[in-house]
Amino acid sequence: MRYLFYIFIVFLASNSFAANKTNPDIGLNTLFTYTSSTEGNSGGGETTNGFAFQEAELSISSNIDTNFRGSAIFAFENEGGEFHFVPEEVFVETLSIDSVTFRLGKFYPFFGRSNQWHTHAFPFIDANQTREQIFGEEGFNEVGLSVSYLAPTPWYLEFVAQVFNGDNERAFASGVNDDVVGVYYLKSLWDLSGDSTLEWNLSYAHGRTQLNEQNDVYNTALTYINKFSNSQKLILTSEYTQAQYVLIANEDVPGTFDSTFRTGVSSTWVQFQFLKEWWAQARYEVVSNILNASAEDTTKTSGLIAYVPSEFSAIRLQYDSIDDPAADEVEQRVILQLNLTTGFHPAHSY
Amino acid sequence: MSRLKVREFKKKGGRQLWVAYVLIPTLLLTVGFSLEARGALKVVATTTTLASFFQEVGGDRVEVKSITRKNQDPHYVEAKPSYMVILRQADLFASVGLDLEVGWIGLIQRGAKNSRIQEGQPGFFEAGNHVEVIEVPEGKVDRSQGDVHPYGNPHFHLDPMRAIKAVQAVEAKLVELDPKSKEIYLKRSKDFQKRIASKIDLWKKRVKASGVKNVITYHKSLNYFIRFFGLEKIGNIEPKPGVPPTAKHIIGLIKLMKEKKVLCILNESYFEDTAARRLQKVTGAHVEIVDVEVQSYYTELIDSLVRSIEACGKGRN
Ligand SMILES: [Zn+2]
């Protein structure tokens, strides 16, 4: 049924493309990686040493008419050597209503600073722990409706109310309990000067888990951006997510879960463009069990250097050190990524 | 009968009260808003040049803002949410078009949540649609050629005749959106066009008298200016649009400049001038850092470019 819906939207979109004088914007992004980790391939973890085709992403977007805009992003994902073709986002948005935008379809909810970023736009090669720990590898991606309102204030102030079906293994599952997930989001951005801004996000998601428990997930994020010149820029971001429940499936006994716990995750990172084509970045993340104060936190420290000759290509080298108290030793990992885009490059959201 | 009427009246009275409490404030608010809206037409332009055209034609009937600052490169702009705040109230969003702003315009246009300025609406204007452009690429364009402008060179405003064409389109748009002020727009537009046209001959004479025959520029921003004034463009400092100069390319340029006896390097003020300075050192050519978007008035912009050519002709830094 859901696929019928996607096919319908794609059909709608492609139909309008044909009728339009202007072509839809089509872009293809591909990500290749080389990984070397102390965990190796024997640990049974997620890390796979060696070359990998991380993901390819095909994006198509276009104004359908003066009232609607359609956008579709399909990913070919490599999951342990098996390729999956996944519609990551397929949605339509209104263009002709003042102050308000309705969005209907499958998309990454407005939640936190980083939830809507696609893999190729991640500041680091892998996803932030604020997203991965709470919502799993695929992130928070749902089918539903959002209404965003831009307040008539002299600075940027946006409220988004959203309702989704709830299809997240770790946090929300309406399929089990007929419930929906409500997500509320606030974004406020102030210009500190002509070249620097401060952004604050506050988000809250409410629904039920697969075990039918009420679940609340909160997020708050602060971002400071300063563009010193055309070739120098600084981005400082700190994000904190807290969830009442996080379910992790027990792979040996289907339908059961290894752990349900109260989790708080923080990610803080700095990105510094020191030359036109070069970036240096660092990230520090903490995953903590709030209920059990004596439990040790898992920490992850990352460093990254990126060579970005154009907005269509980037080579990035990342180092991670993951200190999980449950593991025997600290995992050290190096990943090299090649990030390529052909065709239309969607404008970067600020 | 009469009783019924009274009851009806009472009922109406009740309704009138309701009207008084709810509708009147609403009406007042709406009137307040439309009064505000009936003031000057709010125009937001992507460049200072386009903004100046609207200001010249619109006078005090318009309130004009520019997204890019005077010396900002309009090719690469960050889609800051603050621009959406500026566009939220706009009656008209004016762009150069021809994909000059493709990297950032869509996000702020949609993010403004203002139905009037969306694509296909009367409140969205693309100047490039009204001007004949040069350098439309033939055949397939791909990224190995750099950031090629796929619909032709969008920097047409540095050709005074094409600027006049754009001004006429600006005038037509303002008349369309605000027909009551038509007379004002027509008159101001005519005056402005005359002011530009009356200077053309002198500008041409001055360029000719400077003795400068050919130039090097950083980007293709000055191609229309070069063509209009009968100069010859020998090369660009950037090897391909949007690609920073390489050593190999600079060596090629040095050879070419010596061969063609190039005395004038025009480096657009929003691009790096390191390579231009190197060329100056090696070849002895004169470097002029030039503005290519309006800083104060359009005629002053062209005048300053003509002055730069004259300075090249004198050959002293
Ligand atoms: Zn250009």
Image (cartoon, helix red, strand yellow):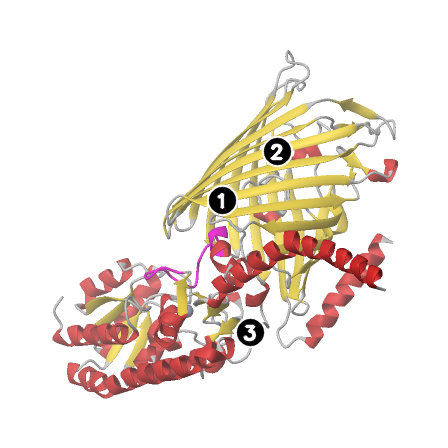
Magenta stretch containing residue B215, yes or no? no
Q: Against A292, is A237 above or below?
A: below
Q: Main secondary structure of the magenta part?
A: loop
Q: Find the magenta span and give its range.
A: B68-83
**Eye-nearest disc, 3 or 2:** 3
Rounded to the nearest whole Å, what is the CA distance between mark 2 and mark 1? 16 Å
Label 2: state its secondary structure. strand
Q: Against B46, is B135 above or below?
A: below
The residue at 43%/75% (across/down) is B153
**Eye-nearest disc, 2 or 1:** 1
Residue picked out by circle 1: A189
> From the image, which quarter does the N terminus of chain A lie in?
bottom right
**Residue B133's quadrant in the figure?**
bottom left
Q: Position of residue A135 (x, y in %)?
A: 70, 35
Q: Amino acid at mark 3?
A: Pro
Label 3: state its secondary structure. loop
Chain containing mark 1: A
Residue picked out by circle 3: B122
Q: Is mark 1 within 8 Å of ligand 1?
A: no
Label 1: state its secondary structure. strand
Residue A169 at least partly seen: no
Q: Position of residue B217 (x, y in %)?
A: 30, 70
Q: Amino acid at mark 2?
A: Asn
Q: Position of residue A343 (x, y in %)?
A: 59, 64
Rounded to the nearest whole Å, what is the CA distance between mark 3 and mark 2? 40 Å
Rounded to the nearest whole Å, what is the CA distance between mark 3 and mark 1? 29 Å
**Residue B15's quadrant in the figure?**
bottom right
Mark on residue A219?
Answer: 2
Please tell me how crowded label 3 is: few (under 14), some (14-19), or many (20+) other residues with Cα within 10 Å: some
